[in-house]
Every structure is written in structure tokens, then in C-alpha cells.
Amino acid sequence: MNIIETKRVLVTGAGGFIGKHCLPILIANGFDVHSADVLPIEKRQGLSCHQADLLDAKQCDELLASIRPTHLLHFAWYAKPGEYWTSQENIRWVEGSLHLLRAFHRNGGQRVVMAGTCAEYDWKYGYCSESVTPLSPITLYGVCKNALQHVLNAFSRVTGLSSAWGRVFFLYGPYEHPNRLVSSVVLNLLGNKTAPCSHGGQIRDFLYVEDVASAFVSLLTSHVNGPVNIASGRPVTLREVVLAAADCLGARERVEFGALPSSDNDPPLIVGDNRRLTDEVGWRPVHDLEDGILKTVRFWQEKAGYE
């Protein structure tokens, strides 16, 4: 049997925010799914779980040699809120990702998609297009992601490996870190506390995490190469997002806008051009903001025992 017909995929960071939502979608799409994470992954039918530290070259080589995946969906990275923007762990993950890429190719890999970030763009432009907006990241996180993207593109040209790079914008949903915007607002309101926020006028591009996962799987199964924005293309203020969550709980009066300072370099507008994603990949989101926020609120209600 031709190895590409087996559709054997390795998902790194499979226990993370996006990765865990990709697993059921990949299984439903007929992949032989293998998950890799430094922590144990909950087992399910159709999933082979591997506990491995991908920053350990020996473990990485042994994992890739044993699985011999045809597809690679790479999410693993350092993502601790408040620290990942400046952490030197970003450099380690560039090194580890390059080793992973070479091991994947060496073991017969055919198609790889890696997760990038909208922080690769020059945010002073506001509107972020893959073909137009300059890449000028100002954080170590953005610089490292952008550097890996350039190497991936060049490596693919030299080797013939099929590859794409999904630039993630802003997301929310079940299993988000409790300190992130939507989850922190919901948890404060569920706990009968106030929800302190900045002024809320910042305009961003949000997608529900299950839609983000679906977009990555669609990108993986497509023939589209290079950078692709994983974005809604719909500008929305942080105030709208926060109030949508508060309204689900009837707690709008406990949201305190302006209670938290916004940083001096906080850009007023970040929105993604999603035409490559919709026109070339052929993907559309399933959830609008209201639907996604409601599902997120219900998740935290159940998890926190407020139902």
C-alpha cells in the first residue's frame, strides 16, 4: 500500500488548547491519529497516545521513526500566559521544531502544517494580509515563529515537502487558560465577582477554538502551501466579546471597563484577511460570536460546578 494512503498524522501539543480540539476532527476524517505531548493525553477510540518531550532530540527521533507519519500537525510550543511573549523557551522551540521537521521528512513525511501567529505581522498596519502586510514582529515569540516559518518555506522548496503555516489570530473556547480574556471574565462572573477589563475599544479578530481546529485540519488536507491566516476576517471590539459573555450570565452590570490599564503599545486594530482560508482552502466557520461564547460559558459552568 502506498504510505500516503494511510493518512497517518502526528499531532504535537495534542493536549493543548487547539490540539485537543483537532483530534476528534482528524479521527472523523479517516486519519490514523497519533498524539504527542509531554503530559499524558486522555485516550479515545481511534487515537494512539505518545508521551514524549519533543525538545529531547533522542525522544523525537525515536517517536518519528516508530510512527512514520505521513502528515504532521505541529502545535507544541511554550505558551504560558504572561511569559511566552518574551521567554527564551521560544528559541528552544525553534530548535526543537527544526529537528522535528527534519525527522518527519527523513521518515517519509509528505505534508506538514505548523501553527504560527498574527504576532509575526507589523501590527501598526492593523489589517493583516499574507501577501501584503510586512512581517515585523516586536516580541521574541513573534520573531521565533516568523523565523521558523521562513525556514519551513525554504526547506519545503529544497526538499519538495508539502507545507503550510497557519497564522492564528485571537481565539476562545473550552479549555482555554483561566487567565485569558474570555475565560477570566466568565469565571469571575460565575464566582459572583466583578470582571475588571481595559477600556474594551481594541478591535480584534476572534474565532471559536473548534473552528480554529477545523480550519487547521482543512488546511492539512488541502494542497495550499505557505502562510494562511486562521482568522474570521470580522472585526469585533473586546467590549463586544466581554459583553456577549456577561449577557449569557445576566451579569453585564458587574463588568468594569477601564478598571485595568491598557499598555502604551496596545494596537487599536488587528484583523486578518481570511481570503486564502475561505477561497483557496475552502473553509468557513460554523460558529458566530454569540454561539461560540454561549458554548464557552456553558463549558465553564459545568466545569466549575455552577450548573
Image (spheres, rainbow, N blue to C red):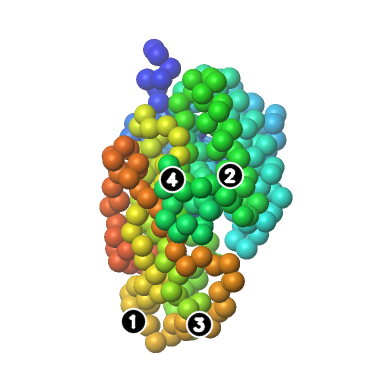
Q: Is 291 on the left or on the right of 138, as rendered?
A: left
Q: Give the amino acid at mark 3.
A: Gly
Residue position marked by numbered label 1 in the rendering? 250
Residue extending farthest to the top is 1
Residue position marked by numbered label 3 in the rendering? 258
Residue position marked by numbered label 2 in the rendering? 145
Label 4 element class: loop
Query: In the figure, residue 25 lies in which quadrant?
Result: top left
Residue 255 spot, x, y in % from top left: 44, 82
> Which of 259 and 185 lies nearest the eye of the viewer?
259
Above or below, comparing residue 167 to residue 160 in the picture: below
Residue extending farthest to the bottom is 253
- At label 1, counting other C-alpha atoms closer than 10 Å, the crowd grade (few under 14, some 14-19, many 20 or more) is few
Q: Give the amino acid at mark 2.
A: Lys
Sequence-wise, which precedes: disc 2 or disc 1?
Answer: 2
Q: Residue at x 38, y 32 (%)?
A: 224
